[in-house]
Image (cartoon, coloured by chain):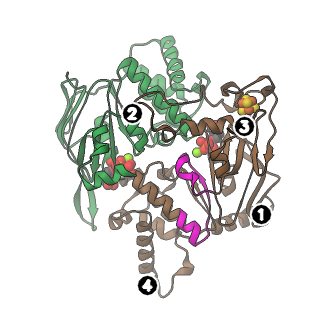
Chain colours: A brown, B green
Amino acid sequence: MHLLDIRNLTIELNTGDHVIRAVDKVNLSLKEGEVHALVGESGSGKSLIAKALMGVLNERWQVTADRIHWQGVDLMRLPPEKRRKLIGKEIAMIYQEPSSCLDPTAKIFEQIAESIPEQGLSGYFWQRKKQRKQRATALLHKVGIKRHTKVLDSYPHELSEGVCQKVMIAMAIARSPKLLIADEPTTALESTTRAQIFRLLKSLNQLKSMSILMISHELAELNDWTHGLHVLYCGQMVEAGPSKKVFGSPKHPYTQALIKSSPEHNVALEHKSELYALKGTIPTLQHLPIGCRLGPRCPQAQKDCVATPQANDFHGHTVACHFPLSQK
Amino acid sequence: MQPILKVQALNKQYKTRDGLFRSRFFSALENVSFCLNKGETLAVIGETGSGKSTLGRILAGAEASDRGQILLQGQIIEDDGKRIVHSKELRLIFQDPMKSLNPSLTIEKILSEILELNTQLNEQQRRDKINETLLTVGLLAEHRNYYAHMFSGGQIQRVALARAIILDPLVLILDEALSSLDPSVRAQTVNLLLSLQRKIGLSYVLITNHLSLVRHMSDSLLILDQGKAIEYGKTSELFSCAQSKQGQRLLSC
Ligand SMILES: Nc1ncnc2c1ncn2[C@@H]1O[C@H](COP(=O)(O)OP(=O)(O)OP(=O)(O)O)[C@@H](O)[C@H]1O
Ligand SMILES: Nc1ncnc2c1ncn2[C@@H]1O[C@H](COP(=O)(O)OP(=O)(O)O)[C@@H](O)[C@H]1O
Ligand code: SF4
Ligand SMILES: [Mg+2]
Ligand SMILES: [Mg+2]
């Protein structure tokens, strides 16, 4: 059974005079114990999808979907109170903006202690307090913070961005959630810690069979341990499928551009020479191009592309393009 | 050739609480020195909390150092914590751009205010300059009417870049400004930065932990560890033979 199954998720913003569709009919499903990656241009709606799932978008956003099934229960049909409870217990999210998600008025220890579940603790309250301290320290060690005493006793503004990000990760895994949504969790981290965090998530996935939805740009680092890869452009899912297939033989021009433009892809490149990049920028949501949204920037575009391409399924590898790339 | 930016024995301490009443000093930077030539890039790497952003903030004048000098084109601009010249030639792009943009103003207002304060341009000229800058960083002219919260994480980085280059600075300090971008936008931004460097000889202090970017973009490299410079030299040489254990570890991943 699918752990999470989202069908035709649409997210719209009501600006007063008109409605902007930021995410358009996106499908996404993952099984228990799987790791999926969500990649795409900045502004393509990755964070919106994650926030919609967590139910933290404010009332200006309208979220509709044919279904959002969590272990067979349709979240769309649950009363908000019940939904929040269910999600709070089983799904955890690491938000993209660490400093704005930590409470600036509380010390790190209080914030971590709050996310440690009561069930694991026993004894009188002073014993519990000690246990909390131990758990918090252990969590910080796990995410690679060595100076735990100083960090636990600090306010967020006294810490560097990278440490805040690590604290957020510690808080998210404190409850051992069934599903962890990680929105660009490693952007402010140094290479050694980034590798350490990826290893930690990998082991949580294998040992505790925690499912993970990773929103990240480190394509090269994601490829070897994610099961599925979803590529988003301008609010639409342009390509999705098993990571090996999507990464190894991309069929959509945008996916290919993403892979080709990472500096890791071309290590033999001359110093300070130009990297491969698509021309132009992602359009604003108010002025989307007609037909394929990649159209104006696509190196393969042809006349037919003024019609919106439908998603085609090649053995579980879906591509929305009129002229999918063929393999060499 | 005279270096465009020279930093001599920079020191910075923060007061931290220790118990209820006592306070202790914590050294965020200790005797950091380096030179940067025109049209070159210095990369700064180091673990989280090693003092990279502190260095960036001090260079840009957003914070004062305790001891040490900063020289721009041979002229002392900060001496032992006293900012002597407030220079618009040194601009910083923050690690967290949201914090540095006023949420109640449109992008046009934000950019226009900077021009009003620092240049003699009239309204029409300001308007043109803003349009031109937005296009340079890969945004559209219509983005001028957006508020900061309407951009996604990667787009806001471009706004920050626009804000930094609109005054035509000599040195740009990029604090992890490229990390939150997706590969295709990052490649575009890297190309943009490199072409600005070729065309107008802009120098960069690139604070990042993306080793492939460091290797591709930088001429020299400074490695910080707990506020101390443990390695400093040509990028190509350091990658092949770093001296310290810590340096080797950071460069090997
Ligand atoms: N206002 C402050 N009060 C007390 N300590 C501070 C303050 N600002 C920074 N520090 C401390 O100074 C040290 C250096 O911080 P800095 O932000 O320069 O790190 P960084 O190298 O940029 O790390 P990152 O890669 O995580 O951004 C950290 O240990 C941090 O906790
Ligand atoms: N409050 C808002 N008002 C208007 N547009 C918004 C708002 N928040 C986000 N958007 C737009 O929604 C789109 C998707 O944003 P987001 O999900 O954050 O992108 P990303 O894929 O980079 O995470 C972007 O085009 C962004 O400009
Ligand atoms: S449908 Fe056409 S424009 Fe769109 S990605 Fe495919 S080839 Fe390019
Ligand atoms: Mg995002
Ligand atoms: Mg920093």
| Distance from Cα at disc 3 to Cα at disc 4 | 63 Å
Label 1 belongs to which residue?
A: A79
What chain does mark 2 sit on?
A: B
Q: Which residue occupies the foreground of this view, A140 or B200?
A: B200
The amino acid marked with disc number 1 is Pro
Tell whether A148 sits left or right of A62. Answer: left
Q: In front: mark 1 or mark 3?
A: 3
The amino acid marked with disc number 3 is Ser
**In contact (CB < 8 Å): disc 1 and disc 4:** no
Farthest bottom residue? A123
Label 4 belongs to which residue?
A: A127
Q: Quick check: is B216 in the magenta stretch? A: no
Callout 3: SS: loop
**Residue A312 can be seen in this image:** yes
Label 3 belongs to which residue?
A: A326
The amino acid marked with disc number 4 is Gln
Label 2 belongs to which residue?
A: B217
Q: Which residue occupies the foreground of this view, A136 or B189?
A: B189
Give the quarter the ligand 2 occupies: top right
Q: Is residue A179 above or below residue B1?
A: below
Q: In front: mark 2 or mark 3?
A: 3
Tell whether B246 sits left or right of A111. Answer: left
Say whether mark 3 and mark 2 are on the same chain. no
In the picture, the disc for residue A244 is none
